Image: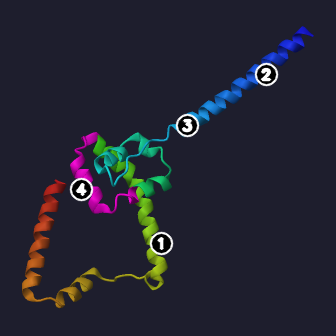
Amino acid sequence: MDFLRKHKITMAVSSITVVLTGIGSTIWLTGSSPNAPDPKQNPKESIKFIASKNFNRLSMTEKKEYVKKFGGPRVGFKAFKNSKLSENEKKALRNNMRPVMREVMKERMKEWKKRNPQNKDRRRGDPAKHMKSRMEGTDSDTRAQFMEFHKQLREEMKKQNK
């Protein structure tokens, strides 16, 4: 009888321990959801939050919603410039944003295909012919400026790639 009583007590204590551990783990995992600053009220802190590990704890849906709260890329870029992140933080920001922006672009592409079904499989054809047809509609001064601009742009890109 003594053995049976000890066994029942041991089982009860073990069961209570397992239940409490499960409840504690659940509270810890869900209760540690990051407090994200409001992008509209504090964009600099929001940029730092996106660069943090806490941003990665959010689901993809939550990440996309958070990014949409910024109010567009212009606001986000301005906040990025003003936030003065370190190089490691900038790298983390890029790594954290890459999958989010990929998903946003996929959604935009799906929307575009729904709105423009005739453009779904449209190809532009020869880019040289396309450029030529665009240039024929402009005056010679504008064409010269455009060509000079592109020439300088290519030179800058070559310098940056070295």
Local packing at callout 2 (Cα closer than 10 Å; few below 14, some 14-19, many 20+) is few
On screen, residue 129 above or below 32: below
Name the one closer to the observer, 102 or 122: 102
Residue at the spot of label 1? 110
Residue 29, label in figure? 3
Closer to the N terminus: mark 1 or mark 2?
2
CA gap, disc 1 and disc 2: 55 Å
For the stretch drawn in magenta, the main secondary structure is helix
Name the residue: 24% across, 82% down: 128
Local packing at callout 1 (Cα closer than 10 Å; few below 14, some 14-19, many 20+) is few
Residue at the spot of label 2? 12
Closer to the N terminus: mark 4 or mark 2?
2
In the image, is 161 to the left or to the right of 60?
left
Closer to the N terminus: mark 4 or mark 3?
3
**Residue 70 is a magenta residue:** yes
Residue at the spot of label 4? 78
In the image, is 58 to the left or to the right of 80?
right
CA gap, disc 4 and disc 3: 34 Å
Name the residue: 70% across, 24% down: 17
